[in-house]
Image (cartoon, grey):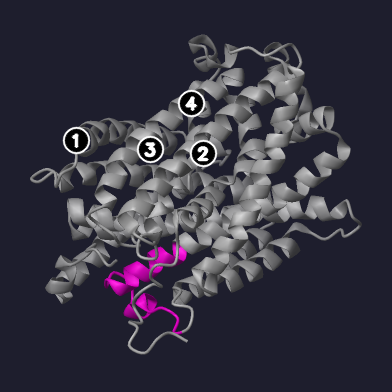
Amino acid sequence: MADAGTPTNQLKKNTLGVAAITFMVVSAAAPLTGAGGGIPPSMLFGNGAGIAGSFLIVTLILLAFSVGYVAMSRHVKNAGAFYAFAAQGLGGRMGGAAAMVAILSYNAMQVGLMGLLGAVASGTFAQFGLDLPWYIWTYIAIALVAVLGYRQVDLSAKVLMWLVLAEFGIVLILLASILFTGGADGLNLQPFTWSQITSGVPSIAFLFCFAGFIGFEATTIYSEEAKDAPITVPKATYISVLSIGIFYTLTAWLMTMGIGVDKLLPTLTEMGDPSGFLFMLGETYVGATFTMIMGILFMTSIFAAVLAFHNAVARYKFVAGREGILPDSLGQTHATHQSPHRGSVIQTIVALAVVTLFLVNGLDPVLNLFVWMSQMGTLGILGLMALTSLSVLMFFMKDAMGESVLATKVLPLITGLVMGYLFIIIFRDFGALTGTEGNLGWMIPALVPLFALIGFALASMLAARDPARFKALGNTKA
């Protein structure tokens, strides 16, 4: 039980260290899912071998974004993260807009991944004679995530730690085999040349790369539960960006070396389904048993990402309730676990409802549920990153509070412009990128600005109802 007098609107303090936070956010980026399901399509539809160089560039951009992000995190410690930064930098109404966009985006990422998880689990278990439709496995996953999300956060951290370690381990074994055998035609650095990076359709490649990092920004969500947050959160953020970036860059490079630069695109085109490319390399360089194990870990990789996004959504709902944007009841933590249990329960209900909606309409779990929802989530989070960069600029405008000009002005301005440009590109081309037809091509991405307007209106209502509470939006809670 919680100690007597423990506030019921506070998360459990001093629970998470650098390693725990890092594992939780890296799991949202789903390293094996990105390697198997993200890199091959980005090669085929994007810039081919140049995807390795693209990942290196995106890593540098996100490191630059992180400088301002962690600088502000030292002064604003709140589980609302994007919401809190927007509220403190741009005012409470923009904070409300950010909160609702964050809730929509992380919801979309989690629910979309549920479709991919169901499809992968169905194929994986069918190999062992347990042939069930995708939605059965998706409903089982929803139930498991509901239990872990309802309980204390460190239980989730322990589960995610082992899953993420296994993901990295299995891919690194394959990469080492390609590296030490010299690949198909010997090792070279062609994928990092400008001609390769700008070949094909580089805009699609860069969008895939940014999507591969989504989740790293969630380090600040756990600031209220972190041990020594001013040190722990910045360390976890930089470690997350570097580990994800180095992993994806090396993976893309060595996957290319494994087949050869000249043979890469012809091989992917012939395969039809590029998601099998990593497993083809696994069978070639390590063997069939290894590939079977990789398939199982591919499934657990998606589960780890689903759990991480569930935790993120529950905390955003908790903060929005605690601070008055959503009903106050959402801002209460569990008496025993001190987890945001009500937000977790609502998230479970939302996942059940959306998955069932797609099921009864006969939509595909991957091409529709996963692609549509995950791309909408990517769109929303890119918009939040652009807004956060602007928030950093405004927050430090009058007083840098000991932070450098690079952290408070130069890098936030540059990364804000980059993220804003990407947001516009994805919004404009959403239909082409996701395969949505007709009105769905604009209706799905339009949910992002719609939720921003809803959040803006809810914050305005709070300002009229309780000015003092509105003024305190985004204040430090740690």
Dot 2 alpha-carbon crowd within 10 angstroms: few under 14, some 14 to 19, many 20 or more: some
Residue under pointer 3: 423
Q: CA distance from mark 4 to mark 3?
A: 20 Å
Residue 56: mark in rendering? 4
**Residue type for callout 3:** Phe
The image quarter containing residue 281 is top right
Does the rendering let one see residue 423?
Answer: yes
Q: Which residues are magenta?
A: 313-335
Residue 477 is a magenta residue:
no
Indicate which disc, 4 or 1, sits on the residue closer to the N terminus.
Answer: 4
Residue at the limit of the structure toward the left, as seen here? 398
Query: 384 left or right of 260?
Result: left
Q: Nearer the viewer, residue 307 or 70?
A: 70
- x, y percent for residue 445: 44, 46
**Residue type for callout 1:** Lys
Residue under pointer 1: 409
Q: CA distance from mark 3 to mark 2?
A: 25 Å
Dot 4 alpha-carbon crowd within 10 angstroms: few under 14, some 14 to 19, many 20 or more: some
Query: 65 left or right of 180?
Result: left
Q: Main secondary structure of the magenta part?
A: helix
Q: Nearer the viewer, residue 202 or 392?
A: 392
Indicate which disc, 3 or 1, sits on the residue closer to the N terminus.
Answer: 1
